[in-house]
Image (tube, coloured by chain):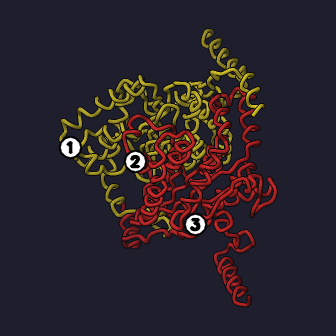
Chain colours: A yellow, B red
Amino acid sequence: MARKTDKDKGKAEKGRAKGKGGAADRLRLREVLRVPPGGGRIDLRRSDPRAIPAGPTGKAAGVAATAAMAERLASLQERLYASATAGDRRRVLLVLQGMDTSGKGGTVKHVIGLFNPSGCRVRAFKAPTPEELEHPFLWRVANALPRPGEIGIFDRSHYEDVLIARVRELVPRSTLGRRYGQINRFEQDLADDGVTLVKVFLHIGYEEQRERLLERLDDPDKHWKFSPADIEERAVWPAYQEAYEKALERCSTEAAPWYLVPADRKWYRNWAVSRLLLEHLEALDPQYPKGEFDVEECRTRLLST
Amino acid sequence: MARKTDKDKGKAEKGRAKGKGGAADRLRLREVLRVPPGGGRIDLRRSDPRAIPAGPTGKAAGVAATAAMAERLASLQERLYASATAGDRRRVLLVLQGMDTSGKGGTVKHVIGLFNPSGCRVRAFKAPTPEELEHPFLWRVANALPRPGEIGIFDRSHYEDVLIARVRELVPRSTLGRRYGQINRFEQDLADDGVTLVKVFLHIGYEEQRERLLERLDDPDKHWKFSPADIEERAVWPAYQEAYEKALERCSTEAAPWYLVPADRKWYRNWAVSRLLLEHLEALDPQYPKGEFDVEECRTRLLST
């Protein structure tokens, strides 16, 4: 115990040395929300979508804490982008998955909206096109990856190919079974190539989804987000939960872990995803590259123009 | 004169009816900044990059006016995006051109940052890759166009092929001469297909560019944005100005006019580009599509789940 205390103190001091300090900065949300790699059984029914596992405990504090991250997020993003101009291949890929209405789009709007759009590559994956279906399932995602220095955002992803594909039996069981391993190898390759994967499952409850669908029905300006098929999907809710459990169990790896974000509270979802991105970007600690030129000489030349 | 007054009054009343009213809403910046189609001679030396041709006259008011547009911009963007889900093919393409340091990147950050990233497709064009050089010059831009409902942003564009290509004589003069017509036909096709082109030339002065380059030199965190080649480009400043004049003269068309934005003042640049986008989006007047389903029936079914 004594050793642990020393180590914690060391971490805290390092935090202060960087001028960050405070309880919030000692929090490691990624450890709290990470689905442990190793294939242990996941039971989503035991995971409360209204939970607040760590961080701000109320809406006002949560909204303020998210806003307070904006400057650091944008600054880290700029460093990452700048670093790539000098050959750094690192980049971030945020994968958003979750049931209809779980807030994938809201997360992009509120969290990715904090970044500079220049460095963001957002891609929403819908039902595959005929061309996409002619290729292996990973083809379309491989074509939408962030470039070095960018933050890529997948609103749905290759996981649909083990989610809806499983629930609706779109492929033979044996094909499906192989996909988990294919995904893990694909993501390992990405990680080896400098991609930091942040895979987020936005976990909402059955009741909350009903409320959100009703809200869409009640507001004509939201009808475009609604489809009667959304109701039919609710009939197979348990099958989807099971498909998500399998994906979390089999594809939460050391190289690319899943994070389980309780998402019934929108403010908490926004705070948690922002915080996860912040922690990952801080771990990358990207640096502005040094200029490969003589500053004084350039200044003199410039002043003579 | 009496008729004109009546017409103006009519416009003002329409503005008020939509709850917008006020002098700012009667302003049509697009008419003020538009480079008149028809090929008339443009002399950039007679165009003051510090000018404030219309709108707020000071920085504080300008920043506030830009922020005040955010909600309307985001709301119009959402309608455009929603409308596309029902088959509307309309979309917007903001083309940003200007000398180094003219603020293309800053415009993306501050203006496009007001929109939902989901509906934005930002693409920065650098020196063509070997693959791009194997294709006609319009190929790479044709591959980066916004999809229906999106706002596309080109940070540099196909105009580089009549700008740097002209100044640096990268292609034979006859090839260059053909490109203006090719660009006009290309843009006419885009307009016919539902693309609203907003082509913005960010006009900065020679002195202002020096100041901005010096700022980059003075701040090690900005060295990544600087290259000694930027100084060499200044030596051919007049040739670039002439190339821009030609592009504005020959490619400001009814279908896709150029807008000349004085850009020495960053707050004015941000306000003007925001305002231009607002006016174009308001002219499009996109509408949320009606749901193709029975709301009451869906509500009943949903409540039974």
Disc 2/disc 1 C-alpha distance (Å): 37 Å
Kindly identify the amino acid type of the residue bearing the numbered disc 1: Val
Using the rendered view, name the quadrant where residue A288 is placed. Answer: top right
- Residue A171, numbered circle: 1
Which amino acid type corresponds to the residue marked 3 in the rendered image? Pro
| Residue position marked by numbered label 2 in the rendering | B139
Residue count near mark 2 (Cα–Cα under 10 Å), binned few <14, some 14–19, many ≥20: few
Q: Are marks 1 and 3 in contact (CB under 8 Å)?
A: no
Between the residue at mark 3 and the residue at mark 2, the CA separation in whole angstroms equals 25 Å
Image quadrant occupied by the C terminus of chain A: top right
Quick one: SS at disc 2?
Answer: helix
Q: Could one spot residue B197 in this view of the protein?
A: yes
The image quadrant where one finds the N terminus of chain A is top right
* Foreground disc of the pair 1, 3: 3
List x then y, in percent, for residue B141: 45, 48
Residue B79 in the figure: left or right of residue A71: left
Res A273 visible = no
